[in-house]
Image (spheres, rainbow, N blue to C red):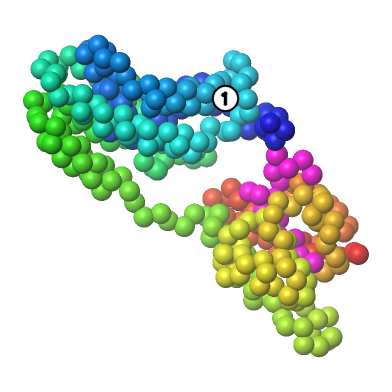
Amino acid sequence: MEYSEKITGIWPKQGFDHYFTMSNVIFGSIAITLFVAYIGLVIIKKKKPNLIILVPVILVFLLNCAFQATSFTVGPGNGGNLRYLITISPLLGILGVLAIDELKGLEKKYLLLVFLLPLALVVYAFQSYAHLNYGLHLSDGLNNTEEIENWKPLIFTIIVIALLIMPLKKKHYLIGVAAVSILVGVTSITTRRIQPEERAVKKAAKWYASHIKLNQNSQTIQNQLYNDTNRVACGHALFYYYLGKNKYDFVKPAILTYLDQETIDTLDRGDVIVWDSHYGDRKEVPTSQPYQYYENSPDYQRIQYYQSTDNRFTIVFFQKVVD
């Protein structure tokens, strides 16, 4: 609770409808369509739903929506992070299986359209843009490009709806859903490309490694910016990944944590701070410092920096020049 209160207000809230809009990204078209079908089936058949599974799904979902509400305050904002709802994805999948099981014995399957057609309209209206689905994204506003429509969520929703209202056996429904799932995977999953931020960190790590000189004699130490006896502090884990080292592979254990004031105060003269715009100044770490703190301080000297090609990330090397 103390941490929750500490980070309240740090990240902007995205609105109560945020997770509704992004639900196709989190759960996928198939799971959502089957979930709505399950709700429709228990209503049509006047059966008691599986509350042990259904209630946690609805409560967790609505609670996270409440966290994002801008008109009232409930708990901390989390910036609308989607991973917090992955926890209920397995339960949603179980409800989908139960939906297929409930189709057995329902002769008037077209009645499901009362629930599924509105779903299709919602997907068409709110979930048909590339920045909302399957890892594709449009311009972030920097280049003034327009939104790009992405019809995959609507197409797969319609396919599942058509499948559900067909007079099939349960085995055929399962085969059909499995086939559509494979189709979704084949058309949606792509190889991840290295991002501009990661390229910049890789260049920084290469530069750092190329300037390390072993502590062989006093003359070598004096002629180098730093050597392997100087401690390094960096909050970006990829820096160590591209170095091929963990923090204990250095002569003096490196610092891999947020660069708060308490941490940098432990550094000695000659030690190196690798500040970056992603992890260097964190709102949830009150004593972390912005770039200007190091740039304007006489205690530190900037020795190198790299900027990503999209101009959204910077990584800077500072060396402490006083004891």
Q: In the rendered view, does 79 fall on the left or right side of 137?
A: right
- Note whether 76 is above or below 252 in the view shown: above
Q: Is residue 286 left or right of residue 129?
A: right
Q: Along the line of sight, which residue is nearer the eye, 236 or 315?
A: 236
Residue 283: horizontal and vertical position, in percent?
70, 39
Q: Image quadrant for the C terminus?
A: bottom right
Quick one: 255 or 191, which is closer to the camera?
255
| Residue 144 visible in the displayed image | no
Residue 283 covered by magenta stretch: yes
Specify start and end residues of the magenta stretch as a single range.
271-287
**Based on the displayed image, in which of its 4 quarters is residue 112 positioned?**
top left
Direction from residue 275 to residue 194 in the image, left or right = left
Can residue 78 be seen? yes
Which x, y percent locates residue 199? 53, 60
Q: Which residue is disc 1 drawn over?
A: 67
Question: Magenta part mainly helix, strand or loop?
Answer: loop
What residue sits 24% from the left and 18% below the top?
41
Amino acid of disc 1: Phe
Disc 1 is placed on an element classified as helix
State the image coordinates of residue 318 (x, y, percent, origin top left): 76, 61
Indicate the quadrant where residue 256 lies.
bottom right
